[in-house]
Image: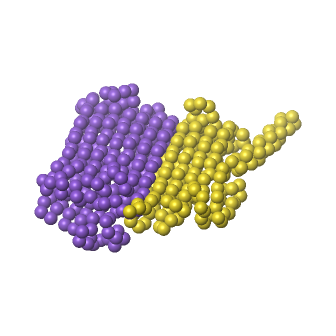
Amino acid sequence: MKKTPARLILIRVVVIALAMSFTFGGVAFASRNVPPTPETATLTITTEVVCDRKMKEIEQLNWECSNKDLLDNPPLTSGQKYGKIKYKENTFSSGGTINLYKDFKVDTGKTPNLEVTKNIGYTAACKKGSVSHTEGVGMSLKSKGCCVYVAAGCYMSMTDVQATTETKAQITQTPEMHYEINAGRLEGPGNPAEGIISASMSASVDDEHKGLKLRYKTTVDGSFAFYEVMDFKP
Amino acid sequence: MKRAMGLIGAVAITIALMVAASGVAAASWFVEYTSAKQAVGTSAKFVDWESSSEKPTLAFGKVATNRNFNLHGYTSKWNELGLLPTASCDEMNAYSKLHATDVQATTSAEVGITDNPALNYKIDVKGLNEGSMAKGRISAGMNVYVVGDPVLSYEERSSASGLFQFHKEMSYTSKIATP
């Protein structure tokens, strides 16, 4: 975990590409996906808001699937696979103008099973004006003798910012997760944003013979441009 | 005396405008609906249905354009809720609540339960003039609960107050893959 104290660095650019290849082989890990269920569901939500005072948005997704009877879980039977994707988001702005665009898609039959893109522009109109945004995605895959859990997300509390985030997760094909965040100031790329921001990813893989645990978090406080990409794939 | 008469006249005109406008609004709330069994409540604000061979099972839309024409300054006010197709253990609803002045708003909803369960809801709210913003408050969201395989729960809500432009489209479909 890294933390940059306020005002020590005026402009901070963080670029992280995190790709994990497991020692037990990409092919073996790819086969830990949960095949799509006969009944599939799609959800598409598009939101565009421009607001000069208060804006609030909450969102929560929980999706579970299995190649056998899901309602009879646990314990997992031999050959049974279980998968889960969770997503949570909170955005709140006051005392300024926010311009929010969000595109949220879930498809339980096609990959990526979850795809979210978001664009947040905010300018404070008074001293107490700010926007806060929390976003988190997690996915877990379980079968007898193996458990995989991956999570990524960000938190920001800003007074001036132009930020974009991109989230992708899939479990019905080769398990993968992608999280990307880019935050700068409204006037254009390269200019600093004001506030505090953090982005993180954690992964845990427990196999019958091997184990892997990873946690990574970057936090920046002050004026900055921030770019972080995190990928989990075999 | 003249002032009092003027005030009474203004109130009378306002009431007349409100009655006339509510009639138009009520008439335009339900563009189209088909159902085998239905119950339509006061001002067509409530619909109950069992089944239909038509697609979509239920569709309606609403358009409202208002400027301060009542005494309290809030004119365009609705609370739309109740899209609950129940196929197996699926339950979903989409809604919007609007309380605003100087507003132009459009909603549309489509629900299907007889084929693949589907729910589409759209709301677009802005100011009366091109590029202008509405004033007041709004919230819109969607809830989905599916119990079976897969298990899916989803909740989403956006709200804004002050001057705003608001556009939201929400869509849910479910289908069973043919072998």
On screen, residue B160 above or below B82: above
Of residues A197 and B18, which is closer to you in this image? B18
Compared across the picture, whether A99 is left or right of B126 comes to left
Of residues A22 and B32, which is closer to you in this image? B32
On screen, residue B110 above or below A79: above
**Residue at the image position 26 percent from the left and 41 percent from the top:** A229
Chain letter for the yellow part: B
Quarter the C terminus of chain B occupies: bottom left
How is the rendered protein coloured?
A: by chain
**Residue at the image position 46 percent from the left and 45 percent from the top:** A46
Quarter the N terminus of chain B occupies: top right
User: Residue B87, position in %: x, y?
Assistant: 50, 65
Q: Classify residue B134 by image quadrant.
A: top right
Number of numbered discs visible in the structure rendering? 0
User: Residue B71, position in %: x, y?
Assistant: 72, 42
User: Residue A9, position in %: x, y?
Assistant: 24, 31
On screen, residue B104 above or below A203: above
Residue B33 is at least partly visible in this image: yes
Of residues B33 and A154, which is closer to you in this image? B33
User: Residue A82, position in %: x, y?
Assistant: 29, 64
What shade has chain A been given? purple
Compared across the picture, whether B42 is left or right of B86 comes to right
**Residue at the image position 40 percent from the left and 38 percent from the top:** A119
Of residues A30 and A20, which is closer to you in this image? A30
Residue B48 is at least partly visible in this image: no
Compared across the picture, whether A5 is left or right of A166 comes to left
Query: In the orientation shown, which residue stands out farthest toward the front?
Result: B179
Q: Classify residue B178 by image quadrant.
A: bottom left
**Residue at the image position 69 percent from the left and 60 percent from the top:** B41
Query: In the orientation shown, which residue stands out farthest toward the right?
Result: B1
